[in-house]
Amino acid sequence: MRMKLGKRTLIILGVAVVVMVALALAFGGGPDAPNVQTEDVGQNRIVETVIASGRIQPEVEVKISAEVSGQLIELPVREGDRVTAGQLLARINPDIFESRLSQAKAALDNAKSNRATASARLAQSKAAFSAAQLAFRRNQDLYDKGVLSAADFEQAEVAFQSAEADLEAAEQNVRSGGFSIRSAEAAVKEAEDNLRRTVILSPQSGTVTALVKEEGEGVQGIGSFQGEVIMNVSELGAMEVDVEVNESDIVKVELGDTARIEVDAYTERMFLGVVTEIGNTALNATGAARLSLESVTNFSVKVRILSGGHSDLSAGKDSTWTPFRPGMSATVDIETEVKAQVLTVPIKAVTTRPDTSDNSTESQLCVFLLEDGKALRYNIQTGIQDNANIEVLNSLPEGAKVITGPYDLLSRRLQDGDAVGSSEGELNSVSRPGISASISVN
């Protein structure tokens, strides 16, 4: 009896094991099949963006530099003051320039006096020349008639030539006096200009955004080197963000592209902008950096901040007030291309595998779709992308589920046709490998 009961128990246990294995294979993907995450393939709107960081600055900013050297004796403005075109910004000590102007005017008067003397000398030379010319002609007639000796004629001829040379010299002196006058007049004009440059007026209306010098300090004027900057006058009504865009992205950016601007000073708020300027030359294309091939190549892109996006912040403020200050940090998302209702897959679902066509050794972009418990490879061609999705240019099966993870499995180990289990499907009523079970035997 015990022998029969033992055989019956073994048979029942064997049947139970076979059933459990069959159920596991049918619903669990096999005892070694990994679980994967999936998402639906669908139509989505994609906005391709280029992200760059930079600083806010006025669109129009003038650096006020000294044109002449000297000491600042008057500085009637302070940083943050509003100024108008033609308003006094600074005054440089004019004493030395007034002295130089007086010297230049004295030199001009002296040149005019010298020319007057030369003109009088010219008149005398003309008179002497006329007298010498008449005497020479009379002596020549007498010499031709044999009345005058050769020695006397030669003396008369020398006197005539001397008078002619004196006349030419006098004419040259008058001409030289004219040149001296013009040179002295130019010196006077230069001295007047330098004196005028001691008074620095604002070239435009705006706000003093930086005051580099203080009253009493000396400044270096424009000469062999660039003049020292005294202050900056900026028009804060129009602000922009100057960002650096990498060379791999600059080809996507175009004038007029819409941009979304995030300013560090205003958290959880986005401002609108538009691309107004794109640099044609890389920022490191000149100087010593030009020789380094390892340096990062960036291009300057300027994005105007549209006033309509922050009108609420300016409510109740003066018309010249702005919520932005030069030097504020900002991050810009430039929308380079927008496509509506295109076939997309998550970026994390795209991977690479060796290209099997024509024994190629290159890699091919692909995705794996979950079909009937298996991962099937589909080679794809891609278009634009955003932060989450990427456009697929070729077709994929309708209603397909694309495998998005785990990353290690998708990026290296998963192969075409591998059996997998989906983490989205829950088989609550099915026994799985590793679940303990008890069997009662009657």
Image (cartoon, rainbow, N blue to C red):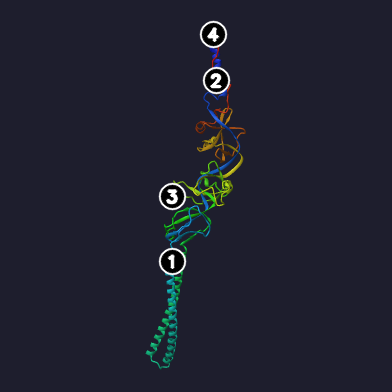
Q: Is residue 156 visible?
A: yes
Pick the quarter of the image with the N terminus: top right
Q: For the residue labelled by badge 1, is the local secondary structure a helix, a strand or a loop?
A: helix
- The x, y position of residue 189, in whole percent, is 47, 68
Look at the picture and state if 189 lies above or below 142.
above
For label 1, count other residues whose C-alpha is less than 10 Å away and answer few (under 14), some (14-19) or many (20+): some
Instruction: Name the residue at 44% across, 88% down.
Output: 134
Q: Choose mark 3 or mark 4, whichever is in front.
A: 3
For disc 3, the marked residue is 289
Residue 423: x and y in percent read 55, 28
Q: CA distance from mark 2 to mark 1?
A: 108 Å
Foreground of the two, 130 or 247: 130
| Front-lying residue, 143 or 106 | 106
Foreground: disc 2 or disc 1: 1
Determine whether the residue tagged by mark 3 lies in a helix, strand or loop.
Answer: helix
What residue did someone put label 4 on?
Answer: 5
Dot label at residue 98: 1
The mark found on residue 117 in the picture is none
Considering every residue shown, the one lying at the far left of the view is 151
Q: Residue at x 55, y 19 (%)?
A: 20
Query: Residue 170 appears at what percent x and percent y?
Result: 43, 79
Tag in front: 1 or 3 = 1
Picture coordinates of residue 113, whole percent (x, y): 43, 76
Q: Nearer the viewer, residue 68 or 53?
A: 68
First-in-chain label (1 vs 3): 1
Residue at which label 2 appears: 21
Q: Disc 3 residue type? A: Ala
Disc 3 packing (10 Å; few <14; some 14–19; many ≥20):
some
Q: Which of the marked residues, 3 or 4, is nearer the chain's N terminus?
A: 4
**Secondary structure state at the residue bearing disc 4:** helix
- Location of residue 40 with respect to 107 vertically, above or below: above
